[in-house]
Image: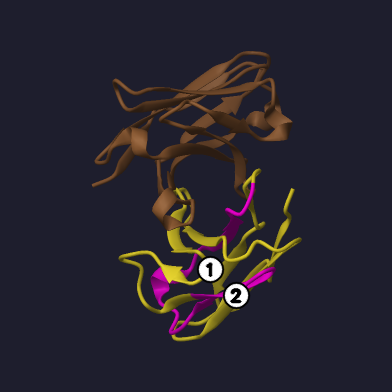
Chain colours: A brown, B yellow
Amino acid sequence: QVQLVQSGPEVKKPGASVKVSCRASGYTFTNYGISWVRQAPGQGLEWMGWIRIDNANTDYAQKLQGRVTMTTDTSTSTAYMELRSLRSDDTAVYYCARLGYSHGDAFDHWGQGTQVTVSS
Amino acid sequence: DIQMTQSPSSLSASVGDRVTITCRASQSISSFLNWYQQKPGKAPKFLIYAAISVQFGVPPRFSGSGSGTDFTLTISNLQPEDFATYYCQQSNSFPRTFGQGTKVEFK
């Protein structure tokens, strides 16, 4: 079955960087895209961007441009999201989600989430 | 960017009720509308894609309708496990955007 397993919780100081991983299994990794979505405490879902695995093309949310980078390692079927110059309002649960091309590009499978806390 | 607006933001209902949640897009998104369910402390769960297609394994009491700018998620015969927050999301264009969520609470 399709699984997306994310790395563990992180605590970072303002100005630092964080890199979250998302290891995929149960499907052909290069046949789908991966999106990243975050959720601040008590808030809704915010799309951060996505990466097309077969050609590594990316598209990022305007507000994160210049601070976020999404990459993949196809040899290990792992996607990565790095966020730099962290601020307190980056404190959130970060999710990876598979882009279901056969499901109207919906996010058809999700990782379990990674808590990132930014605090001095 | 396409803005997605859900209503209501929250509602109270009882087991067995029929519940309707509305999602409106700021411009036409054809049928590129998806629905998710999220329970506290859990990742969202994919329910419906392309406005009306129920994902395999999702109970048939969940249904979706609409096209263009106005969409609806209906839960008929509400069950205890359905108390959660529901989000709509458009996949018509980038950036992808979500509604603010509708919390379905126990009356």
Q: Is residue B70 or residue B85 the one in the foreground?
A: B70
Depicted B33 relative to depicted A24: above or below: below
In the image, residue B89 lies in the stretch drawn in magenta: yes
Q: The residue marked by circle 2 belongs to what chain?
A: B
Same-chain check, marks 2 and 1 = yes
From mark 2 to mark 1, how far is it between C-alphas?
A: 6 Å
In the shown orientation, is residue B5 left or right of residue B48?
Answer: right
The residue beneath circle 2 is: B66
Q: The residue marked by circle 1 belongs to what chain?
A: B
Q: Percent x, y for residue B107? A: 56, 78
The residue beneath circle 1 is: B51
- Asked whether the viewer can see residue B76, the reply is yes
User: Nearer the N terminus, badge 2 or badge 1?
Assistant: 1
User: How would you rate the neighbour count of disc 1 (Cα within 10 Å): few for under 14, some for 14-19, many for 20 or more?
Assistant: many
Q: Which mark, residue A63?
A: none
Q: Which secondary structure, mark 1?
A: loop
Residue furthest to the top: A16
Depicted A78 relative to depicted A61: above or below: above
Q: Is residue A46 or residue B77 the one in the foreground?
A: A46
| Kind of residue at badge 2 | Gly
Q: Which secondary structure, mark 2?
A: strand
Depicted A85 relative to depicted A38: above or below: above
Residue at 57% over, 62% down: B33
Q: Percent x, y for residue A30? A: 35, 33
Q: Is residue A118 or residue A25 the one in the foreground?
A: A25
In the shown orientation, is residue B30 left or right of residue A102?
Answer: right
In the image, residue B33 lies in the stretch drawn in magenta: no
Report if the CB atoms under discs 2 and 1 are less than 8 Å apart.
yes
Which portion, as a residue range, is magenta? B64-93
Residue furthest to the front: A55
| Kind of residue at badge 1 | Ala
